[in-house]
Structure formats: C-alpha cells, structure tokens
Amino acid sequence: MKQMLLTPTRSLWSILLGDHRYHAKQAGNDQVHAWTLVTSQALDTAWRIAKGSVMLAVSFLVAALCYFKRLHLYLGRRLKWWIGYLQRKFKRNLSVEAEVDLLSYCAREWKGETPRAKLMRKAYEELFWRRHIKCVRQVKRDNYDALRSVLFQIFSQGLSFPSWMKEKDIVKLPEKLLFSQGCNWIQQYSFGPEKYTGSNVFGKLRKCVELLKTQWTEFSGIKDYHKRGSMCNILFSNAILEYKLYEALKFIMLYQVTEVYEQMKTKKVIPSLFRLLFSRETSCDPLSFMMNHLNSVGDTCGLEQIDMFILGYSLEVKIKVFRLFKFNSRDFEVCYPEEPLREWPEISLLTENDRHYHIPVF
C-alpha cells in the first residue's frame, strides 16, 4: 500500500517539476526574444540615424561640389574677361607689336596651296635666307600704317633731324605758309577723319608739329637702344599722341610740296619726283595735292607710292620697301626716293599689297 501511495506522489512531483522547467525555459526564451527584439530595434534605429546622416552628408557634398563647380566656371569666365581686357588695354593697343619669327609669321598667315599663298611663302623665304631678315614687327592695319612704320623706325633708331629742320623752327611753319606765302587755303586741311577745322587749323597744326619736334629731339638724344625701344612701346600705345604725330608728318610733306612748287615757279631745278607729282591733274599744285590726296590719308586711304617718295624726301631718309606680291620681278625691292640726294639713313618696310606695311628686323 505504501508503495502504491508513493508512486502517484512521484508522478505528481515529476509533473510539477516538468511544468516548472517548462515555464522556466519558456520564460528564458521570452527574455532572449525580448533582448533580441530590443537589440534589433536599437540597431534599426541606429541604422536609420546613420543612414540619414550619410544621406545628409552626401547631399551636402553634392551640393558643395555643384556650388564649387559653378563658382569655378564663374571665376573662369571672369578671369578670361579680365585677361582679355588687359590684353586689349596693354597689348592690342600697341600699334607696333613685338618681334616674331619671320617664317613662323608667314606659315601662320599664308596657308593653303593657292598661287598667291605659294608666292608669298617664296617671298618670305627670300627675305629670310638671302636678305637676312629674321623677324618682323606687325604694324596696326589702318590708314596711318605707312607713316607709323616710318616714324617708329626713325625714333627707335634714334635718327637725327633732317638738315633743313635744323635750320628752321618747324613749329612756326603753319603760320609761315599763311603769312609769308599767302596759303590761306590751308584752312581746308583735314586731320584724318576730321573733314574741316576752319580757322582753328593753325593752332592744331602748331601743336602737332610741336609734339613731333619734342619727341624727335628726345629720341635722338637717347643713346641706349633698349631705352629707346621701351619709350617707343609707350609712345606707340597712345593713340592720341600717335594721331598728332602722323598729322604733323602729313603737314611736313605738304610744306615740302609747297616749297618745291615755289621753286618751280621761279624756274629752279626741282627733283624729278616733284615734276611727276605736279604733272598729274589731281596734284598740279599744293592745294590740289592737299585736297585730292593728303586730306584722305588717315581717313579713307593711306599713302600712295608718290606719297612715299615725298615722305622720304621730306624726312631725308631712304625708305626701302620689299613688295612681296612683286616677288621675282624688278619691282620686288624699291626705294623712296630712288636716288637720295645725300647719304641719308635707310629704313626698311615690307608690304604684301602696297596698302599695309610691316617692319622687317635684320
């Protein structure tokens, strides 16, 4: 009986103990699940926060990159504008540019296989190999460029005044033409694009001639070649001063034409180039020469060949011109005037069309 009583008891205890173990295991599982859930939620929250921070950082970085890209483009455009502005102000205003290699200039300007391009290349090669011209200075293309090319070389070489200018005060020449020779028609003189200046012409001419005298005196007194070159760069970047100097040269030419015309009227022997000048209907006297030719210089046209003769004669320089479009002909190299009266200094020009001139550098 006792054994029978104990057996059920053990069975009940076993059941109770099993229940307890089951509940304990279940509680442990619930606790593990709860920790797993909390950890998962924490990790999920942390990931969302980190993901948001990363996305925010990436968005900021992209925005910063876009901003700096736009800033770079803007600064690039502004820098390009300023470079262009400075080039226009300090380089492009220089009416006689720096020396460049002659053959490089030719290759850049005369490409292709047209007959004219081939002729020009051969002419430039002739200058380089046989005439020993290694460089060229480009001169601003306008209707003053012949006067500019000549005056630049006179100043850069430090040439002295013509002999006749040393004997006369050229500043007084405008009044001399009016009062001594009765040339009241000089009031119709045109300063390049200015068609008419009336009674003010004498004052303007006097200022122009005075500037020419001052500048010429200054340059001829400088012995250092490099200093003269630096001063030329300054002078030939000032359009206003240049304009006055070229008008002074035009007037000097007119004065010489008037002087020779007066000599011709008294039956004196005059240079052949002036006989040729006065034989033309459009320049039979100083007035017609001024009205039909000289007044247009600087405005609608440059110097013609006969004008180059007069310029060389007036300044007492021998102007040697290489006419490249006349290569392989007797007119390839010409001098103005052809037979200078004395041992005048020589300056050289080159032209591709008899309209625009550049300065060769030996």
Image: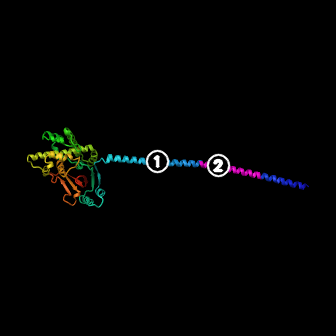
First reached walking from the N terminus: tag 2 or tag 1: 2
Magenta segment boundaries in residue numbering: 22-48
Query: What is the quadrant of residue 321 in the picture?
Result: bottom left
Residue that mark 2 sits on: 41
Can you tell which of label 2 and label 1 is closer to the viewer? 2
In this view, the residue in front, 269 or 129, is 269
Label 2 crowd (10 A; few <14 / some 14-19 / many >=20): few
The magenta stretch spans residue 89: no
Report if the CB atoms under discs 2 and 1 are less than 8 Å apart. no
Q: Residues within 10 Å of mark 1 (few under 14, many from 20)?
A: few
User: Magenta includes 31?
Assistant: yes
Q: Position of residue 260 (x, y in %)?
A: 13, 47
Query: At x 12% / y 46%, what residue is drawn?
Result: 261
- Which residue is at the front of the view, 156 or 206? 206
Left or right of 42 on screen, residue 171: left
SS at mark 1?
Answer: helix
- Residue lying furthest right in this view? 1
Residue 15 can be seen in this image:
yes
Does the rendering let one see residue 253? Answer: no
Amino acid, disc 1: Phe
**Which residue was labeled with disc 1?**
68
Between residues 42 and 233, which one lies in front from this camera angle? 42
Q: In the rendering, at what x and y percent does residue 112 appear?
A: 30, 60
Tell me what residue is drawn at x 27 percent, y 54 percent. Answer: 136
Instruction: In the displayed orientation, state which residue is furthest to the left.
Output: 267
Q: Is residue 5 left or right of residue 199?
A: right
**From what the image shows, is residue 116 above or below residue 36?**
below
| Residue found 10% across the figure and 47% down from its top | 264
Q: Amino acid at mark 2?
A: Gln
